[in-house]
Image (cartoon, rainbow, N blue to C red):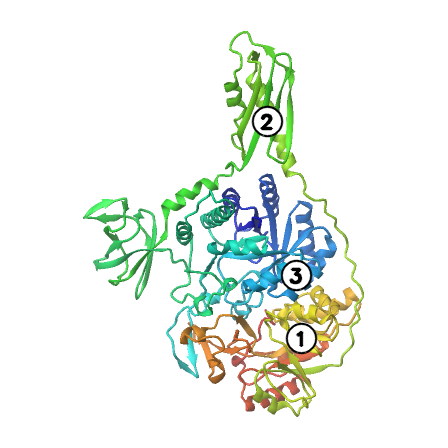
Amino acid sequence: MKKMEILAPAGSMESLIGAINAGAKAVYLAGRRFGARAYAANFSDEALIEVIHYAHLRGVFVYVAVNTMIFNDEIDELIQYTDFLVSHDVDALIVQDLGVMHLLRKRYPNLDLHASTQANAHSLDQVRFLKEIGINRVVLARETPLDVIKQIKKQIDIEIEVFVHGALCVCFSGQCLMSSMIGGRSGNRGECAQPCRLPYALIKDQKVITDNTYLLSTKDLMTLEYLNELMEIGVESIKIEGRMRKPEYVIQSVLSYKRVMDAIFDENQKVDMESEKDKLSRVFNREFTKGYMFDEEKKLINHDIRPNHMGVKAGEVIDYRQNKVTIKLNDSLRINDGYRIIGENDYGDIVSRILKNQKLVTEAYPNDVIMLDVKDKVEIGSIFLKTLDQALEKELEIYLNPNYKTIFLHAVIEANVGYPMTCLLSDGIYHVKTTSQVSLELAQTNAASKESITDQMSKLGNTPFAIIDIDVKTDGQCFIPVKVMNQLRRDAIDQLTQLRMQKRKVFSIIEPVFEHVVIKPRDFESVIKITHENQIDVIKDQSYQLYIEDRIAYGKDLKQAIPMLKRIQMRQTKIDQTTVVHEVGSLYLNQRKYPLITSEFFNVANIYTAYLLFLYGANVVTLSLELSRSRSLSFYQDYVNKFGQKPNLQYVVYGRPELMISKYCPIQKTFKTKDHCLLCEKNQYELKDRVGMRFPLIHDGQCNIRIMHQKPLNLFNYVIELKASGIQSMRLDLTTEKNGEIQDILKTYEKSLIHPVMMKEPSQYSLGRYLK
């Protein structure tokens, strides 16, 4: 076993400083563009240069996230930005967009590229594909189980990074359209509004069966107790989520994981696991889960009580009178601590004064009975939570010092009469030697002693360096001016600093050359996606091409049918004909043998992603549902202009978009059933949000739940312009529609091929992102 890299989030300079001082070996962050946390503080270009220098001096790697979906009109700006990062010695780029991965590998042949968790890699063949296109490290999807990670490490020579702590997405990463489609803020663009953290009610066949609770809000990941398992299988890097979190959260997370990992390697280092878990709870938690990686039960992933920080239980309300609440404590409480009282109503505040035995105190302790001022009525029996622990945060402040000592040196000093004074410094990697410009003279009085030389030469002040061992060799007869020692020490530190900050690689920047890809031409076609067996009977005698989900049985006489694989492929499905696929593992498995149709879940937002899919055997590429009208209409010609080929492009013009696909199921959570209960087959379930919108729930055949848009997308008014722009295939997705509705939809679509047409009751439909 070897120690894993602790990779910490740095959403601000304070968090970066704290992470490094606490012991992180790498940090990940983003600039003001192209990062998946658009609302974090992030870093300007000038600040990024400073950050790289700061981290490299301290021996820490800097990985910059370029992990959003990229549009065609952004490619030039992206390349200018990545050229800038490469020229300033960034250690790696974290990338989501498949086309951008391919483009950057061609442009920077010796730069480390990490596939973001937004790439949703969770199988052997997906990782094989990413390695083949030049990825050096894969950040696995949080849903990836440990046994799959073991197989990947055994069979593929590639670095693996896993999330071990922090917030979880309820949806498979990179596959969520909910924030984008209902709120106009794209998770794939770093703008997620977190609709999963809002309350929902579960509806069964039009009947509300639960109160509004946080049915989609996940607990936070915490895996302190499982680090040895990750080390045993060879995981290279453990990642802490939290670029939006405050510095104290980052510091404590790094400290706790480092202490546990150090104790695994050194039996003399003891760690109090419960104490570390308690501290992690105090800085931030929504309750903790061990996560899918360690086979957490699906229903235990969710925390439906509240969607934000729970703190730690610090007492119980035993009385309330006239805006004063009486609490029996089971934890300490101080002035300026934060608290929340959870009962029928939530109430939170900062402690401004504490009354104990009718006297004002600044601190109270377990078993004390105290009174606090409150503005709202509080119910007896409510739980009292401490959500801000000032004592702990004060304890962590030391790590926010930018000159915190993290580089420890050994020094050898020689000072003898008649010879220049010398200083040899070593950090264990680099060695430097400086020599005074003058020879030392015999002291008339007060010769420099070993003690005085040691004292002066070890003053390293506002630097990250500290001398922990010094060997002074002197004849004890020298007169040494203080300025000579100061200059000698400064010169040595400057030389060592330059060595530690020297460029780690000489990067090449090459103008990419793209090989010619033959795309077999196709006639214009209209396609219908089938999600229920009864839909087949309605349309089987019509001329539409059919995509049928592979969980649905259908007769071989249905000649126009093409199977559509499941979106999530933990273990790849064999491909033996033209097939609709959703992820890169299927491309790798197919090995260009059969022409494939790639779905919208490849997030194709630029021509480079489309090119990569055609290169790997796609014959039809479906464009992202997040493209605007102008970007959609220019896509075909942009591709032709760049690659000299006419691409076969598909566009979804009707149907309820899949907003999420999740391993967690709110139906299973509510009814406390086991996997594959098939309740969603027997009844129609929906989630109802706080404004009354309803989102149908449909399973995928392997107990992943799909949350559908409350309204069908309808672009029939724009079919003619899409077709004129070069789009070769129009797709209609059927989900919850009844037979009569299907006939009306098809009739209206046929008209839309002749002239623009709007459906009746346009308010019942959505235009998605088309007119955004």
- Residue marked by disc 3: 155
- Residue marked by disc 2: 490
Instruction: Answer few, some or many: residues within 10 Å of disc 3's Cα (few below 14, many 20 plus, some between 14 and 19).
Output: few
The nearer-to-camera label among 3 and 1 is: 3
Instruction: Answer few, some or many: residues within 10 Å of disc 1's Cα (few below 14, many 20 plus, some between 14 and 19).
Output: few
Task: Estimate the x, y position of residue 467 in percent, counting from the top left.
Answer: 54, 30
- Residue marked by disc 1: 574
Task: Estimate the x, y position of residue 606 in percent, counting from the top left.
Answer: 68, 65
The reply to whether residue 284 is visible in this rendering is yes
In the image, what residue type sits under mark 1? Answer: Lys
Instruction: Report how far apart the C-alphas of labels 3 and 1 lie in the structure.
Output: 19 Å
In the image, what residue type sits under mark 2? Answer: Arg
Element marked by disc 3 = helix
Element marked by disc 1 = loop
Q: Nearer the viewer, residue 574 or 22?
A: 574
* Residue at horizontal 77 percent and vertical 64 percent from the top: 642
